[in-house]
Amino acid sequence: MVDELRNNFQALQDEFEQQELQMREYAEQNRILKHKSQILLDQNEDFSKMVSELSRYYHRIKQGGEKLKEAVTILDVSDGEMEAKLTHLIQQEVRDPEVPMRTAALEKRVW
């Protein structure tokens, strides 16, 4: 009976030591995981700031694009006076042989 108690005690002591080793290992793993999760939280905060800044840039670019469309619409209106001048130059081209080069240059620039 005493031998049996000694054996049980020894087995419990061995099991206790194993449990203690596992507890130390788990504590070390927990420490490592906490450290890694803190790094990830910091990175997440940095990424959130970057996304926020990129979102502001996107919004500004989108506004710029809209303003550019408005400017193109305004500038796309044909000018009757300019068309009359070009028509006059084209008619002169037919009469004056030196005018064609100037008229062609003007047409490329205006149109």
Image (cartoon, helix red, strand yellow):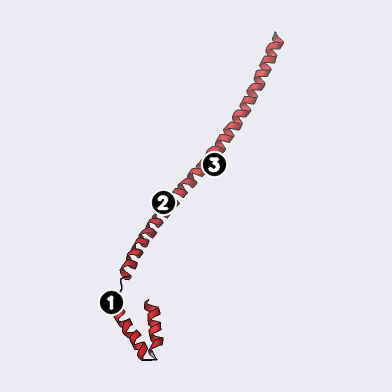
Q: Nearer the viewer, residue 20 or 54?
A: 54
How many C-alpha atoms fall within 10 Å of the one at disc 2: few (<14), some, or many (≥20)? Answer: few
Q: CA distance from mark 3 to mark 1?
A: 70 Å
Using the image, tell me which numbered label, if any, was put on residue 52: 2
Element under disc 3? helix
28 shown above or below 14: below
Label 3 is placed on what type of residue? Lys
Q: CA distance from mark 2 to mark 3?
A: 24 Å
Q: Is 18 on the left or on the right of 74, as rendered?
A: right
Tag 2's secondary structure? Answer: helix
Q: Position of residue 62 (x, y in %)?
A: 38, 58
Indicate left or right for 85 with 32 as reference. Answer: left
Q: Split into 4 quadrants, where in the image is the C terminus?
A: bottom left
Foreground pick, 81 / 8: 81
Mark-to-mark CA distance, 2 and 1: 48 Å
Q: Residue at x 67, y 18 (%)?
A: 11
User: Which disc number belongs to residue 67?
Assistant: none
> Mark 1 sits on what residue?
80
Question: What residue is pinned by disc 3?
Answer: 36
- The amino acid beneath tag 1 is Gly
Neighbours of disc 3 within 10 Å: few (<14), some (14-19), many (20+): few
Upstream in sequence: badge 2 or badge 3: 3
Q: Earlier along the polypeptide chain: callout 2 or callout 1?
A: 2
Under circle 1, the secondary element is helix
Q: Amino acid at mark 2?
A: Ser
Determine the image quadrant of residue 86: bottom left
